[in-house]
Amino acid sequence: MNDWSRALSVDRAEAQPGSGATFSGNRGLQIEEKLIFDEDGPGRCGVDLPEPPPFKARLGGIERHGPIGLPGLSEPQVIRHFTRLSQKNYAIDSGLYPLGSCTMKHNPRLSEKLARLPGLADIHPLQPLSTVPGALELIDKLAHWLKILTGMPAVALSPGAGAHGELCGMMTIRTALEARGDPRRRVLVPESAHGTNPATAAACGYAVDSIPANARGRVDGKALEAKLGPDVAALMLTNPNTCGLFEDEIVEIAAAVHRAGAFFYCDGANFNAIVGRVRPADLGIDCMHLNLHKTFSTPHGGGGPGSGPVMLAAGLAPYAPLPWLVHGANGLELVEHRAGPAEAAIGRLKGFHGQIGMFVRALAYMMSHGADGLRQVAEDAVLNANYLRVLLEGELSLPFPGPCMHEVLFDDRFLQDTGVTTLDFAKALIDEGYHPMTMYFPLIVHGAMLIEPTETESKATLDEFAAVVKSLADAAHAGDPARFRAAPMLVPRRRLDETAAARKPVLRWRPEPANREAAEAD
Amino acid sequence: MRYLPLTEADRGAMLKAIGVASIDALFAEVPAEARLDGLLDLPRVAGEIEVERAIGHMASRNLAAGAAPFFVGGGAYRHHVPAAVDHLIQRGEFLTSYTPYQPEISQGTLQYLFEFQTQVALLTGMEVANASMYDGATACAEAVMMANRVTGRKKAMLSGGLHPHYREVCATYARFVGFELTAQDPAPGADEDLVPLIDGETSCVVVQNPDFWGELHDWSALAEACHDQGALLVVAVTEIVSLGAVKPPGEMGADIVAAEGQSIGNALNFGGPYLGLFASRDRFIRQMPGRLVGQTVDAEGRRGWVLTLSTREQHIRRERATSNICTNSGLCALAFTIHLALLGEAGLVRLARLNHTAAVRLAERLELVPGVRLVNRRFFNEFTVRLPAPAAPVVEALAKKRVLAGIPASRLYPHRPELADLLLVAATETVTGDDIDRFEEGLREVLS
């Protein structure tokens, strides 16, 4: 018995009928699962490998001597362990996941199947390029779709995720500015931006200057104009923005940025709201990363892998990182070094050629939808968000009234004087069987609740969700904050002590008794 | 469209509830000049059959590693991945969940990441590991930046044995983040003497083991020399399976390990997605980049896990974060964790021995080919041979015979004629005796 799981004593289990207390510590389908390290059986192994024939080792005295300390498990133990762990997770497959700004939409399984074709999964990035023409064709096809959808002439494909794409974009901007002998030092970032934007600008060597929002949740045009100057390298703007609103002055903003000699970087995290209806190039954008795991539905996988291609205007394209895929005299060519057309490339940002496995999935998604389906994606995403807005605006408080794009932002005014916080409200949703909305982001409204339903939810799902949210709002107003503060009650874990976790970090398992001592010292 | 649940009737009813006449009204804030009225010039909606046919055709034009004798490594390795791994990572609860921001309903992800962090720490011989980076090359650049933060210095030195892609990624970051980088020339099969190059301004020395050419090193003396000067030793590992047989960086005195974890659990995927491993000493954790999962208790006192030390991260600290990384390689880390759980101590040690055996046998056979000389003195599952002719055309000629023979050094170092005859060759447990026969025979024919 794993004593960490805190099975209750017989006395206590009997004393509290209906309390959910059990002898095992399990609660029906919620099984207390040990760590793999607690299940170690020395010598046990989940793979059968042949004994190597006798040979003369050539490790030259650099052998490992001590044991590694890895546990031994059989295949059935491993399958059961990870199956049980999976059952402790909420997922888009199991229910509505309205996490604003994250775009948790259905992940087509065709994409998974195709990404596993041996001709795509079982090819090496450094095998002769003559043996992988189909892989180059696939990358070229993906680039073609992205260029048509955004209206932008070039794309850098290697970044590993959105934040990496931001870095790539800002590096090309800095290089372009330096190339024209006009290095600048400030980057303007709205207060509502994703945290990655200021982190990226800083990582790229820029000072970050914050721009306030106006009363309508958009960038304050006057404040922006005032901050623009000859030392501003770029504006980083998310559009639709993180309040779920379209920056309706974006064309004027772009013009002002360009007048100041700066570049206009767009965080394309929310491209899913406008794909097929608006081309970013037509808004005056010079550079924009796309999160393939958002708009083009490659699975989020519990936190990656992502993929962050960067769309580039003609003036930035020469600085795209290596490698480049170009149409040469003999068809598609992969340029892996600074030479020829790629002489001015900023260099390499990642090993090999990019997240090809994610390209396969994104391309399958785009081809499945087609031009018509992708436009419908944007329309249904916006329709679903606005439908939730009207269902809930009477109950929850809307900081910026009026239509939204693909996500709707509420604040916590409706909870005023109830003793219930945004966090409590979100945790209560968990007990109702929903993943909470994004909380406390963006930072420009108090107690933000950002809801993004996505286009892959049905009307009935939204109706049910809205009814539950209304009931919870009513319960909050009825004066029962205790039930909110105690939530969630019905899931694998109640609220976890994050303060303790950070104060004395336990970041790995250690063999007894070291582990026990570390825990007890908390 | 099969992925869209709304019917036309739903859409009509919803527009009515919203109080607008058409969907266009909801896009009214888009400036008129930027509104697209018609459809873009791309194909229309397609069924599974059509999409599968089109992408399947592209796949069929590639020569898959499993369809030919295969000896390509250079930082990405073809290992057998047990069937259970792919089955488990495709469970929707793993595949279709997000970063575990709500720990009460993300304990599955958090627990496996805690197990992953432990496995990585054990394998590398380090005290602590994070929840992954994009890949080995970016992990290496992040390691240099972390060493700069820890030491308060801005001068890093790279070994000539570091993977050229890692080297190039570090150079790109150095240029923009703003730190000094010196890189030694590649020296296949040699022992570099880096010690005299370290001084009181050096933040870190970055080496690789086995190095890019497959050569094994014990970096213990270098670690001491670094520490004497107040610098850190960063060890990159591009073939993590090697640690089943080779002395781990932690035992050599490494301060940070940046590794590529693709070899365990993950397919070749033409270069990505891969899995950056990042491990360090306990005392540096507050300078680490990326997500960290920590153990805690819930309101009932039960053990559980949360993302922790997030005050290092961009979503809290914004422009003062230790890194701008957000999404990393969660599902690749899961594949790694499952594969390594299946292998366990006994399995990994045997797997490493099988790899080493295959490489030794291959080396013995290639050395029999006239004019071919082994460059390495000690190696794990990859080594470098000097051919009597430029390697690139030889590799092309062998590919025509459907033998994927390795990586010509010129692919990565095109401007160094002194490396043109070098061929980097890897052999894993997937290589058969027949594969080796065909490589040796093919090489003899091509060179004759």
Image: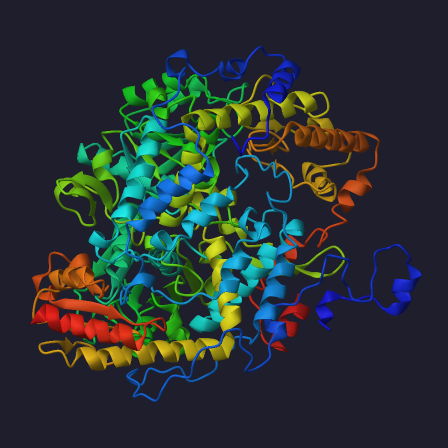
Compared with B315, A123 (above or below) is below
Q: Is residue B196 left or right of residue A400?
A: left
Q: Quadrant of residue A518?
A: bottom right
Decide which of A491, B1 is in the foreground and name it: B1
Which residue corresponds to the image point at 18% horizontal and 57% vertical from the top-left? B411
Compared with A249, A264 (above or below) is below
Q: Quadrant of residue A256?
A: top left
Count of numbered circles on the image: 0
Which residue corresponds to the image point at 74% horizontal and 60% vertical from the top-left? B301
Which color mode does the image show?
Answer: rainbow
Q: Residue B389: x and y, percent?
A: 7, 67
Q: Is residue A139 left or right of residue B367?
A: right
Q: Residue B150: x and y, percent?
A: 40, 60
Visible in this render: residue B386?
no
Q: Quadrant of residue A276?
A: top left
- Can you say which quadrant of the picture contains the N terminus of chain A? bottom right
Q: Is residue A340 left or right of residue A71?
A: left
Which residue corresponds to the image point at 59% horizontal and 42% vertical from the top-left? A92
Q: Residue A303: x and y, percent?
A: 51, 49
Q: Residue A312: x and y, percent?
A: 29, 32
Compared with B287, A224 (above or below) is above
Decide which of B186, A78 is in the foreground and name it: A78
Decide which of A411, A268 is in the foreground and name it: A268
Visible in this render: residue A47?
yes
Q: Is residue B158 left or right of residue A447?
A: left
- Can you say which quadrant of the picture contains the C terminus of chain A? bottom right
